[in-house]
Image (cartoon, rainbow, N blue to C red):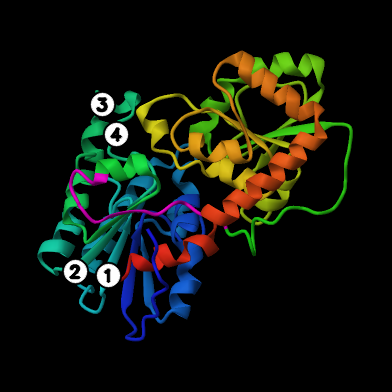
């Protein structure tokens, strides 16, 4: 679907309602925060309303501090109630994932039925699903997963990261836009052109502590491959992996050094389990590698099937993982060719530049 750029001359206002503070969470940074300057250039005004403060964010994933975490959630709910009194001047309420992490969609209901504002609902994961670990616990109840369908129904437009997510949203709303998670290929994800070739290959993975089990699922393959090709396994995450590897380089994820850290990788990894949750993922790890001209080997799950062949290989069974990784370790020419074609693909279909008109279309009345 083609969308022409919209120049908003009337100064319409957008309120971004989101879980996390500005410039901290990857989903927010790459779903809409990198478009904020573009919105301003097109005449829009906006405000940000995160549920968590930066102080609360900094303790969220640390062990202990339970009372502080509970207090942070209470403060978040208090801010949401106050926010409901200040919606009059906004033309659009852009809700990323959910207004509150717990409980029913009370905020969204008031926005729709009391204020009668246009909701743009955005999500990039299958957030309506309950994790297996939560299925029988109180966590499943308080998270109120059923609210996703209700918010879709109440929304003016629904912005989904891929077609799988869009199929779910279309059950409740006819105005669904597949708005991919995109890469800034001009200012941020730029390949390192310096020729610092070494004999030691670096195979890398990046993600959060919650996705480390995906990497662990191919550990036996990596260990077996290491016996033939000594390489460094670079892991960039917010938590050190709970496994050993002969040459493991762990780098604590830092948004300031993220691109430099990724540029030191020769081959990227994106293993996934083949389940409903993984089908909702938007291939972001693969897109990051490809944008930096790093070939990637990934599981053939969800959108990976449509993305990865342009800049790497798909691998399902252990023998396929070993064969594809071995080929990329041994063949510099193949790495170069896949790296070049991968970046070209990202620039054409998954970059900020290529997606700007579609993003602006979300705010067309």
278 vs 84, nearest the viewer = 278
In magenta segment, residue 177: yes
Task: Specify the segment rendered in magenta.
Answer: 169-183
Q: Quadrant of residue 119?
A: bottom left
| N-terminal label among 4 and 2 | 2
Q: Nearer the viewer, mark 3 or mark 2?
A: 2
Q: Secondary structure at mark 2?
A: loop
Residue farthest front in this picture: 2
Residue at 17% x, 56% y is: 154
Residue hosting label 4 = 129
Q: Is residue 253 visible?
A: no
46 vs 195, nearest the viewer = 195
Residue at 76% x, 35% y is: 334
In the depicted structure, whether residue 295 falls above or below residue 176:
above
Residue at 67% x, 18% y is: 322
| N-terminal label among 4 and 1 | 1
Instruction: Give the Cα separation between the discs numbered 1 and 3.
Output: 36 Å
Residue 92, labelled with which disc?
Answer: 1
Residue farthest left in this picture: 113
In the depicted structure, whether residue 32 falls above or below residue 10:
above
In the depicted structure, whether residue 55 falls above or below residue 132:
below
| N-terminal label among 1 and 3 | 1
Q: Main secondary structure of the magenta part?
A: loop
Residue farthest bottom in this picture: 9
Q: Secondary structure at mark 3?
A: loop
Residue hosting label 3 = 137
341 vs 189, nearest the viewer = 341
Instruction: Give the Cα separation between the discs numbered 2 and 1.
Output: 6 Å
């Amino acid at each position: 679907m083609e969308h022409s750029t919209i120049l908003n001359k009337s100064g319409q206002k957008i309120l971004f309602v989101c879980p996390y503070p500005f410039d901290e969470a990857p989903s927010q940074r790459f779903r809409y925060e990198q478009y904020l300057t573009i919105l301003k250039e097109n005449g829009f005004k906006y405000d940000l309303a995160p549920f968590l403060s930066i102080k609360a964010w900094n303790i969220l994933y640390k062990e202990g501090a339970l009372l502080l975490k509970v207090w942070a959630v209470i403060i978040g709910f208090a801010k949401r109630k106050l926010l409901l009194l200040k919606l009059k001047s906004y033309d659009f309420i852009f809700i990323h994932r959910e207004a509150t992490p717990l409980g029913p969609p009370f905020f969204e209901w008031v926005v729709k039925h009391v204020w009668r504002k246009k909701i743009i609902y955005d999500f990039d994961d299958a957030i309506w699903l309950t994790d297996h670990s939560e299925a029988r616990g109180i966590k499943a109840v308080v998270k109120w997963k059923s609210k996703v369908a209700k918010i879709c129904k109440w929304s003016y437009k629904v912005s989904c990261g891929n077609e799988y997510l869009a199929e779910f949203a279309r059950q409740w709303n006819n105005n669904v836009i597949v708005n991919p998670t995109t890469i800034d290929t001009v200012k941020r994800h730029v390949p390192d052109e310096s020729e610092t070739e070494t004999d030691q290959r670096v195979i890398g993975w990046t993600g959060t502590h919650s996705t480390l089990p995906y990497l662990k699922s191919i550990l036996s393959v990596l260990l077996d491959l290491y016996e033939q090709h000594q390489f460094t396994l670079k892991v960039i995450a917010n938590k050190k992996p709970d496994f050993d590897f002969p040459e493991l380089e762990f780098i604590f994820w830092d948004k300031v050094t993220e691109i430099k850290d990724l540029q030191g990788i020769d081959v990227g990894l994106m293993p996934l389990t083949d389940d409903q949750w993984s089908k909702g993922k938007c291939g972001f790890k693969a897109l990051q590698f490809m944008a930096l001209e790093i070939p990637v080997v990934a599981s053939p799950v969800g959108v990976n099937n449509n993305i990865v062949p342009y800049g790497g290989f798909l691998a399902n069974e252990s023998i396929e993982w070993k064969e594809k990784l071995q080929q990329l370790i041994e063949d510099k020419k193949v790495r170069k060719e896949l790296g070049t074609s991968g970046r070209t693909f990202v620039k054409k279909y998954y970059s900020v530049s290529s997606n700007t008109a579609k993003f602006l279309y979300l705010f067309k009345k």
